[in-house]
Image (tube, rainbow, N blue to C red):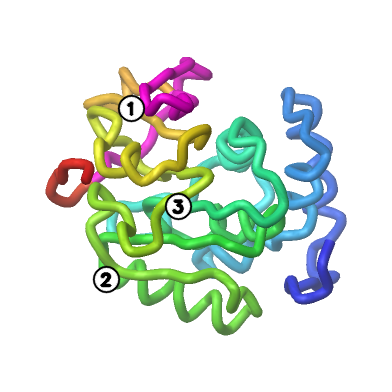
Amino acid sequence: MSSHRPRTLEREAERSRLAALLSKHGIRDARVLEAIRNVPRHWFVPERLEGAAYDDDALPIGAGQTISQPYIVALMTEILELAPGEKVLEVGTGSGYQAAVLSELTPDVLTIEVLPEIAERARSLFSLRGYGSIRSRTGNGWLGWPEEAPFDAVLVSAAPDEIPPALFAQLKPGGRMSVPVGRSPAEQSLFLVRKEPDGTLAKERIAAVRFVPMTGEKGSGT
């Protein structure tokens, strides 16, 4: 791993135990497991919940949002099969933890968050904790980040009721999207979406998941 990424000995044993647990639960990519070991999840949760930071559970972060369960963070990252140097867009910055994990795999991470309070908190945290390579903005995730497209991969950290056309349009041919889809948490599934070389969409259902709904106004792909 490159030396520019933040490193700390804080709660190192707990991070290692979490990575070992995720390995037992089926996460196989050694780079993803190393990212889980390296990123201090307790930096990204409210102070009152730091004691639970290394449990394999989602936790509230305020404004009706959550930091995702570590297993789901690892799974959504793993299925993208990111290569070093690929450009990835995260939709739904939330706590910033998922973006930090992605930044362990590639330095070219962009993230967008619709809620200004949540977005500003994550930006401040990235700056404070040494994740300055992550580029973030406040905006409507349905529209993606067209001026930075195309992307090798997109990871959606909130659940739309359909695959957002603009996000699919912003994928490179051969690009991948990790996205939970469903109108309610009870019926959501995680999909791996691929953009075939001819521009058509292929998708594979990975697992049942529960995410907060994706908000913002729907946009069309261009």
Q: Nearer the viewer, residue 131 or 64?
A: 131
Mark 2 nearby-residue class (10 Å; few <14, some 14–19, many ≥20): few
Q: Nearer the viewer, mark 3 or mark 2?
A: 3
Mark earlier in primary sequence (3, 2):
3
Q: Do the residues bearing badges 3 and 2 touch, measured as CB atoms within 8 Å?
A: no
Q: Hey, what amino acid is under mark 3? A: Glu
Using the image, tell me which numbered label, if any, was put on residue 74: none
Q: Is residue 101 above or below residue 200?
A: below
Horizontal and vertical percent position of residue 127: 55, 82
SS class of the residue under badge 3?
strand
Residue 194 included in the magenta stretch of the image: yes
How many marks are shown on the rendered structure?
A: 3
> What's the residue at 17%, 51% (across, down)?
216
Mark earlier in primary sequence (1, 2):
2
Q: Quadrant of residue 131?
A: bottom right
SS class of the residue under badge 2?
helix
SS class of the residue under badge 1?
strand
| Residue 219 visible | yes
> What's the residue at 22%, 26% (across, down)?
183
Horizontal and vertical percent position of residue 46: 50, 66
The stretch of residues the image draws in magenta is 190-214
| Residue 49 visible | no
> What's the residue at 61%, 52% (across, down)?
86
Horizontal and vertical percent position of residue 82: 65, 43
Image position of 15 (left or right of 188): right
Quickly name the residue at label 1.
Answer: 181
Quickly name the residue at label 2.
Answer: 116
Quickly name the residue at label 3.
Answer: 90
